[in-house]
Image (spheres, rainbow, N blue to C red):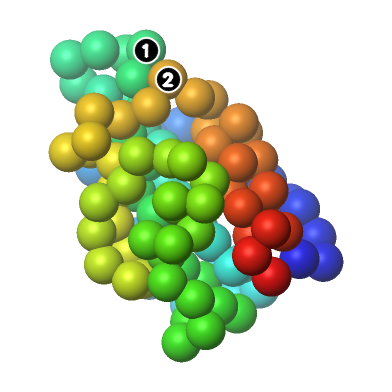
């Protein structure tokens, strides 16, 4: 991968949101995710993940998440880690694991 860029929104997201339109906004992003604290345990982050346009039709998000060794359930292009219990990783650490997986794969 050419570039490793992480952007954090402000203010942080504290409720569930639909990320279906994010690939149309972040045109150059290979993988896009939104993070929010779990409602029952604020030490756990729930990550909603989407495959971005540069990898659409070329990659399977399930393979990327498996290579990154991150909990994930979903389809080839979108999913989350909610049913897998979330993660204790901070968003930036989560992003780094995805970046490293992409570098191994592509």
Q: Quadrant of residue 29?
A: bottom right
At 72% from the left and 59% from the top, the residue drawn is: 103
Q: Nearer the viewer, residue 80 or 72?
A: 72
**Left or right placement of residue 37 versus residue 22 in this view:** left
Residue that mark 2 sits on: 88
User: Residue 1 location in percent, x, y?
Assistant: 76, 66
Q: Residue furthest bottom?
A: 57
* Residue 68 visible (yes or no): yes
Callout 1: SS: loop
At 17% from the left and 15% from the top, the residue drawn is: 40
Q: Residue furthest right?
A: 2
Mark 2 or mark 1, which is nearer to you? 2
- Asked if residue 31 is positioned above or below residue 7 in the image, the reply reads below
Residue that mark 1 sits on: 43
Quadrant in which the C terminus appears: bottom right
User: Residue 22 location in percent, x, y?
Assistant: 44, 66
**Left or right placement of residue 23 versus residue 36 in this view:** right
- Asked if residue 62 is positioned above or below residue 91 in the image, the reply reads below
Q: Real-space Cα distance between discs 2 and 1?
A: 6 Å
At 32% from the left and 13% from the top, the residue drawn is: 42
**Left or right placement of residue 66 versus residue 85 in this view:** right
Q: Residues within 10 Å of mark 1 (few under 14, many from 20)?
A: few
Callout 2: SS: loop
Mark 2 touches mark 1? (CB < 8 Å): yes
- Asked if residue 16 is positioned above or below residue 29 in the image, the reply reads above
Q: Earlier in the sequence, mark 2 or mark 1?
A: 1
User: Residue 88 location in percent, x, y?
Assistant: 42, 20
């Amino acid at each position: 991968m050419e570039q490793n860029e992480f952007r954090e929104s402000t203010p942080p997201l504290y409720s569930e949101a639909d990320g279906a339109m994010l690939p149309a906004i972040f045109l150059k992003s290979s993988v896009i995710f939104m993070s929010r604290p779990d409602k029952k345990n604020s030490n756990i982050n729930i990550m909603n993940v989407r495959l971005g346009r540069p990898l659409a039709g070329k990659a399977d998000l399930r393979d990327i998440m498996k290579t990154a060794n991150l909990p994930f359930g979903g389809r080839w292009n979108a999913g989350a880690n909610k049913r897998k219990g979330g993660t204790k990783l901070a968003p930036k650490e989560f992003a780094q694991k995805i970046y490293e997986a992409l570098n191994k794969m592509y």
